[in-house]
Every structure is written in structure tokens, then in C-alpha cells.
Amino acid sequence: MSVQLDVPVLAGSLVRLEPLTMEHAVDLAAAVEEDRETYGFTLVPRGSQTRGYAAALLARPGLTPFAQVRVRGGKAVGCTGFLDPRPWPDRPALRAVEIGSTWLAASAQGSGINAEAKLLLLGYAFETLGVARVDLNTDARNHRCRRALTRLGISFEGVLRNWSMSWAPGEEGTVRDSAMFAVVASEWPAVRRALMTRLASAGMAAGVSGPPAS
């Protein structure tokens, strides 16, 4: 049986992670069509598909999806979520969870939103859910995503062959090698400091005053 998470809005200075609803579909339709060059290995709908995409995310067992809402302007500019929550075998508390189903509009990439979203999600996972581990993975060929995760201080653990479905165009119905990343509880303080340092400059560049919420 899939564990269902009940997560509130997670608010930062640059991004607000709102539990996904069908009302976000209009904003997402505009966001996905800004520039699709960076979506070569990521499952991202076309603008005309965002209502069906949102409905599918909401119906997927074990997924807690969020709209990434840019604080400046209040528009949804992407999605992310908690996936595959795994409880301890002898108690209901969680031992691990994954962060995934993540994408951002082109205008939101490199803005600090991705870093702050990771800060909010990791903080909630370790400090509220009390997990021992948070997983992240991407297509092994997605070097852009791999570099981004590495810059955030998230540890690369290796490549698992034929691990998950490929979302690359023309590879429908095939499997991919996945580059596996993770943060464990003992690493979280250092990762949090690295994210906060990265966000300090991003926040000033965006004209945001004060530190991001965690």
C-alpha cells in the first residue's frame, strides 16, 4: 500500500511550493512553452496537455506533487514532488523518500528557484518527516541536471543500468540508465549550509531581501 503524504504549502523567498491542483494547469501551459530545449531527458507536457498531465500526477500512487510558484509574479513555473515514500518495516514513520517529477520554465532556470525548492523539500523531509535518506535521480545522459545536483552539494552514488523509463524523444517504451544521487541525514546540515550560501547571491540578484525560508 502506498504511503500518502499530507504536505502543506512550503514557502520561500523565491518560490512557493503549493500542493498541485488543476487550477495550476493554465500557468503551467504557458511555462512549458517558453523554451523546450532543456527538456530532452525530462517528462514535460506540451501546453495543450497540462490538464491531463496534472490529473495524472494527482492520481499517481505514492506521489505528492507540487506546483513551483514564482513568488515574484505569483505564477506557476514548474512542478516537483515527493515520490516513493518508504516507511520503516516495523513502524509507520518514514525512513526514505525521493524528490522527482521536477521541471522548470526556461525563465526560472538559473534563478535560484531550483536551489530554494530543494532546500524546502529537503528541509521538510529531514526536519518534519524525519527521514534517514532522500533520493534524487536523472537520466545518466542528462549532464546538465547532474551538474546542477552536484553544485547543490548532493552526493552522486553511481549509475544503475536500465533503472527507469526513458523520457527522451523517440525512446518511448524503453528504459534508461539512471544517475543516482542522495542526501542522508548526517549530510543534511552541510547541504543546507551550501544551499543557503548559494541562495544568498541568487536572492540578491533577484532583488529579494532577507534569507529564504527553510
Image: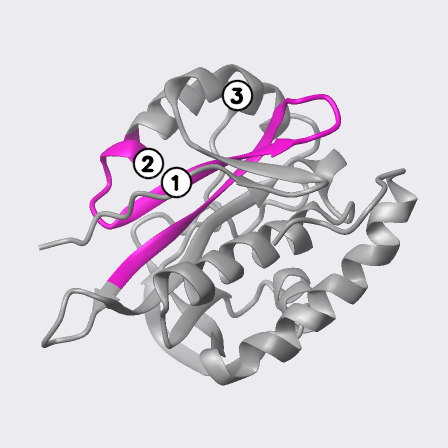
| CA–CA distance in space, label 3 to label 1 | 18 Å
Disc 3 to disc 1: CB gap under 8 Å: no
Residue 192 visible to the viewer: yes
Question: What number is the disc on residue 65?
Answer: 1
Label 3 CA crowd tier, 10 Å (few <14, some 14–19, many 20+): some
Residue 57 is inside the magenta segment: yes
Q: Is residue 67 above or below residue 143?
A: above
Measuring from the top left, give residue 99's x and y in whole percent.
44, 58
Q: Is residue 175 left or right of residue 179?
A: left
Q: Horizontal placement of 2 versus 151: left or right?
A: left
* Residue, disc 2: 57
Q: Position of residue 52 (x, y in %)?
A: 34, 23
Residue 151 visible in the displayed image: no
Labelled pair 2, 1 in contact (Cβ < 8 Å): yes
Q: Secondary structure at mark 3?
A: helix
Label 2 and label 1: CA atoms lie apart by 7 Å
The overriding secondary structure of the stretch rendered in magenta is strand
**Which amino acid does the dot numbered 1 rest on?**
Pro
> For residue 49, what is the image quadrant?
top left
Q: Position of residue 39 (x, y in %)?
A: 59, 45
Give the residue displayed 35% in from the left and 47% down from the top.
172
Mark 3 is on which residue type? Gly
Asked if residue 175 lies left or right of residue 198, the reply is: left
Q: Nearer the viewer, mark 3 or mark 1?
A: 1
Q: Quadrant of the C terminus?
A: bottom right
Q: Which residue is mark 3?
A: 47
Instruction: Residue 93: say if magenta.
Output: no
- Look at the image and give the residue range highlighted in magenta: 56-85
